[in-house]
Image (spheres, rainbow, N blue to C red):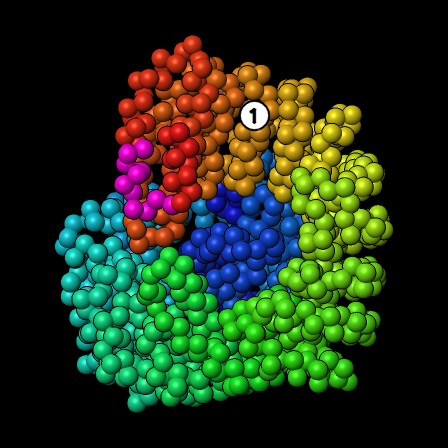
């Protein structure tokens, strides 16, 4: 197996690559006998994983994303820099620590490349030093995870081949697709090339991004029908290949074509052919591949398209999933296909006989000897509960409670996790139904669904197992790795929210009997159980329990085991967040604050939860922002707590984000501080400015990548505190505004292209515009070019989003004085609207920003009116398929941006002597309003915006 490393630029262009090849196969790149078949497969696999990277980025702020995708036995791991450059590694063995160290070493070298004044961002990296370091790091990695050595790939050869393939696809797509299909179907071709061909062909047919997917669909449909038929027949024949990887590739190709053709009524015999392959042949490979294909089709094609063939699909899938199926691999694929088909077999599920048979097959699969089959069977049960809760009463009584409780006891963690997920899903569904019932009663209607209280009725069976699972922690467990004890705690929390007071009786005895246990796992489980049930039961029931537990919890902050103290700090934070009325200032507050401050000197894991608890205390016990309370119960502790936190942040390390957490706590304390704390806030501002200036002075002394990332995080934290301080002290900032702006502008001009730091600096400046209003003009000439520079970098879409907001802030602050800057603002905003690179989430904000500009500069907006109206008219015609909920939300936000823009334009120009310029467009505005008034997908926010426009 070869390992493949590539650096992908912010515009998704490869800027560096190298391959790691097993030593037994290693040859010179100039050796004419060297085989390069594998390299194209590597490139296709990594390219296919790029869409996954963006999805993962939405859910984490970590740079190292770990393994983000898998193709057969290959894993793709990814590290994303602050500038959205992706370091990607293809490998077949998992070793998270080794791979993470490899990425950190390469990132350090990449930072050095960026610091080279002659290097242009996103250009191909030609540095021999970088290449040598990558090869050396790759060698070290290969020794650790597979004993292989590194050989450089001839970059020019790869680029030439890629360009020729892309040109081939553009000039003659039909022949290109036929060539790939022939390579996939050819049994004489190596596995690597066949897999590579399958990935390439699939990628020409489907994509994550809607516009690109539509474009590819049209391209396929424009292929001559006879050629399309040949390709489809070849793919179907390949399902029977003795090489399973080829059959898997064919499954993906067939499903991609089906996603295009089935909704149009084409390829009508596809499902019949696949079902025949499942039900009438003995070839296990063909059965498995056909079931896999059915599963892919069920997953990608809209359920309404397949409803008419649900009987036939269900028959074949259930037949393959039965316990009588001798081949576990076939049964596994059938179980996966059943999971994907559950949504469109509603009619079948409503027929009792068919439902009973389906449930029997799934329940029997949970008893399989194969772990994978068991896991997928429990996944089916989870999905069935989500879709068909109202039909589950009999099955819960007869089988499901016992099966899932047994599943939670399964020694295989993957099985136990899915069984726990079943009960978490029960809670989610029942809470949703209870909310629907309450809403229906409130408006005097009958609820559509009935709650059977499965969660409450099964507490005596589920709770003991969940409590037992809480004791299955490991002392050195990875906090980021999901395990049964974490899953059990989450399930307990959901149960508490679902059954409310009923959770108390089975939990309290466990807490009482284990909280002082000599085994740390039992102590930690007891505290975790107590903390998990604080959201749900009535406050009147919880107050005496918390009052009784408080002294014990505070004492346990001195427990010798870090895991216990960490959970205690988390539980105290939950009390501060959810039950502030339980905290009696004259009884509990002093000891609570003291114990939390003492925790700052403990393990970094504990510090984070201590800081979170302090943040919750400040928010719940202090005055609301803007309330201007003269004092609060936290005022007596404010100076001491802030001083302790600032002293803690002077430490050099940020392990487990402890320093970041401390700065966040300072920010919250300032935001929710009373007026008698203002003198201390003023001191904090000066201290933060001192630290920011010191951090800028260190900028040129940092070379190490880890130090660079830590330095950037420090500056972001300091800016966060400064921003909240500015908002808290609007009357006191003016006399030091020069110093603040000098520091922030200097940071923007000297920071090392760290997008997060720039974002936080922009937010600080946004706060300054609000406080200074018209006085901000003194800094506009210096800041506006920096702001425009951010807008010229659409790859950094989060920074662009903030920059668009800052334009609105500046215009609101300066009013008509903003006009000299608006020409450049408008050009950049319109350009970004048209950019195919800019993330779509920014575009609604740009439309709203047009309204902010118009409202600020009034009749001076007239030169931009024609262009803006044309843009708004184009955007105003967008509508979404009601079944595509993600698109419905996006289109609503886009239309809301249009309405906000129209509102700003109308208000800004209503007193203008050039009001006549707006009159020709009023008819189109009214037509727009009328069309939205009849839009069934219109959101409440859009409705309110429309009312504002009409008013």
Q: Nearer the viewer, residue 224 or 317?
A: 317
- Residue 846, placed above or below residue 934: above
Which residue is drawn at the image coordinates 36% and 48% (left, top)?
887
Give the x, y percent position of residue 881: 29, 49
Is 925 located above or below residue 28 in the figure?
above
Q: What range is drawn magenta here?
A: 929-939
Q: Mark yes or no: residue 290 visible.
A: no
Query: Could you tell me which quadrant the C terminus lies in?
Result: top left
Q: Nearer the viewer, residue 291 or 664?
A: 664
Circle count? 1
Which residue is at 16% across, 57% downward?
Answer: 265
| Picture quadrant where residue 168 is located | top left
- In the rendered image, which residue does mark 1 sit on? 812
Say left or right for 218 vs 861.
Answer: left
Residue 10 visible in the shown view: yes
Disc 1: CA contacts within 10 A as few (<14), some (14-19) or many (>=20): many
Q: Residue at x 68, y 54 (%)?
A: 620
């Amino acid at each position: 197996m070869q390992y493949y490393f590539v650096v992908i630029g912010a515009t998704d262009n490869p800027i560096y690559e190298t391959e790691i090849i097993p030593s037994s196969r290693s040859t010179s790149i100039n050796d004419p006998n060297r085989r390069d078949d594998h390299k194209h497969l590597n490139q296709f696999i990594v390219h296919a994983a790029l869409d996954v990277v963006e999805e993962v980025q939405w859910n984490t702020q970590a740079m190292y994303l770990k393994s983000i995708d898998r193709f057969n036995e290959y894993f793709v791991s990814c590290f994303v820099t602050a500038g959205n450059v992706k370091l990607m590694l293809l490998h077949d063995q998992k070793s998270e620590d080794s791979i993470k160290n490899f990425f950190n070493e390469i990132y350090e070298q990449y930072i050095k490349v960026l610091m080279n004044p002659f290097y242009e961002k996103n250009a191909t990296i030609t540095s021999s030093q970088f290449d040598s370091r990558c090869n050396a790091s790759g060698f070290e990695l290969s020794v650790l995870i597979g004993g292989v050595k590194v050989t450089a790939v001839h970059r020019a050869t790869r680029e030439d081949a890629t360009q020729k393939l892309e040109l081939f696809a553009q000039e003659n797509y039909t022949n290109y697709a036929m060539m790939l299909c022939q390579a996939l179907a050819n049994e004489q071709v190596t596995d690597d090339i066949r897999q590579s061909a399958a990935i390439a062909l699939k990628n020409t047919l489907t994509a994550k991004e809607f516009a690109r997917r539509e474009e590819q669909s049209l391209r396929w449909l424009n292929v001559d029908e006879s050629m399309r038929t040949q390709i489809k027949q070849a793919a179907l024949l390949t399902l029977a290949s003795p090489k399973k990887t080829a059959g898997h590739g064919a499954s993906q190709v067939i499903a991609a074509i089906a996603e295009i053709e089935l909704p149009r009524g084409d390829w009508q015999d596809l499902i019949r052919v696949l079902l025949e392959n499942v039900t009438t042949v003995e070839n296990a490979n063909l059965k498995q591949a056909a079931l896999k294909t059915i599963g892919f089709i069920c997953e990608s094609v809209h359920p309404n398209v397949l409803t008419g063939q649900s009987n036939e699909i269900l028959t074949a899938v259930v037949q393959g999933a039965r316990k009588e199926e001798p081949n576990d691999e076939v049964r596994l694929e059938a179980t996966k296909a059943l999971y994907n088909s559950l949504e469109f077999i509603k009619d079948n599920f409503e027929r009792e006989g068919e439902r009973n048979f389906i449930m029997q097959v799934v329940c029997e699969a949970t008893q399989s000897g194969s772990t994978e089959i068991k896991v997928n069977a429990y996944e089916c049960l989870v999905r069935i509960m989500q879709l068909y809760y109202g039909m589950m009463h009999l099955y819960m009584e007869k089988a499901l409670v016992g099966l899932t409780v047994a599943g939670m006891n399964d020694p295989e963690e993957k099985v136990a996790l899915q069984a726990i997920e079943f009960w978490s899903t029960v809670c989610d569904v029942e809470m949703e139904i209870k909310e629907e019932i309450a809403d229906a009663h409130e408006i005097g209607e009958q609820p559509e669904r009935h709650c059977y209280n499965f969660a409450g009725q099964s507490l005596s069976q589920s709770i003991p197992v969940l409590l037992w699972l809480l004791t299955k922690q490991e002392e050195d467990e990875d906090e980021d790795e999901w395990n049964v004890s974490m899953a059990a705690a989450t399930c307990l929390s959901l149960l508490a929210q679902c059954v409310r007071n009923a959770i108390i009786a089975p939990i309290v005895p466990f807490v009482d009997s284990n909280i002082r246990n000599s085994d740390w796992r039992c102590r930690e489980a007891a505290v975790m159980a107590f903390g998990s049930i604080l959201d749900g039961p009535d406050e009147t029931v919880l107050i005496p329990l918390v009052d009784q537990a408080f002294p014990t919890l505070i004492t346990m902050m001195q427990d010798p085991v870090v895991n216990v103290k960490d959970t205690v700090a988390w539980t105290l934070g939950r009390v501060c967040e959810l039950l502030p009325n339980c905290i009696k200032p004259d009884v509990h507050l002093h000891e609570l604050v003291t114990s939390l401050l003492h925790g700052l000197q403990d393990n970094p894991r504990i510090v984070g939860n201590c800081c979170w608890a302090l943040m919750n205390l400040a928010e719940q016990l202090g005055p609301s922002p803007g309330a201007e309370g003269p004092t609060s119960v936290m005022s007596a502790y404010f100076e001491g707590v802030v001083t302790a936190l600032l002293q803690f942040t002077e430490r050099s390390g940020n392990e487990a984000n402890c320093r970041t957490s401390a700065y966040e706590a300072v920010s919250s304390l300032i935001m929710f501080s009373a007026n008698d704390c203002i003198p201390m806030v003023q001191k904090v501002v000066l201290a933060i400015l001192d630290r920011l200036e010191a951090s800028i002075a260190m900028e040129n002394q940092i070379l190490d990548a880890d130090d660079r990332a830590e330095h950037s995080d420090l500056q972001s934290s300091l800016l966060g505190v400064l921003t909240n301080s500015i908002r808290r002290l609007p009357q006191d900032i003016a006399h030091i505004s020069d110093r603040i702006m000098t520091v922030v502008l200097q940071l923007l001009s000297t920071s090392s292209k760290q997008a997060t730091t720039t974002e936080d600096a922009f937010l600080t400046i946004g706060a300054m515009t609000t406080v200074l209003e018209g006085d901000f003009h003194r800094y506009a000439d210096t800041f506006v070019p920096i702001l425009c520079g951010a807008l010229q970098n659409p790859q950094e879409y989060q920074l662009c989003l903030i920059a668009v907001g800052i334009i609105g802030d500046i215009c609101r602050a300066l009013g008509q004085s903003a006009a000299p800057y608006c020409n450049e603002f408008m050009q950049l905003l319109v350009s970004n609207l048209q950019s195919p690179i800019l993330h779509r989430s920014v575009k609604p904000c740009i439309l709203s920003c047009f309204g902010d500009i118009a409202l600020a500069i009034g009749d001076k907006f007239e030169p931009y009116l024609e262009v803006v109206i044309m843009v708004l008219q184009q955007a105003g015609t967008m509508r979404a398929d009601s079944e595509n909920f993600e698109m419905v939300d996006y289109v609503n936000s886009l239309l809301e941006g249009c309405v906000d823009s129209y509102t700003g334009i109308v208000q800004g120009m209503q007193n203008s002597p050039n009001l006549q310029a707006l009159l020709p467009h009023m008819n189109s505005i009214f037509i727009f309003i009328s069309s939205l008034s009849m839009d069934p997908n219109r959101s409440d926010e859009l409705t309110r915006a429309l009312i504002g426009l009409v008013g």
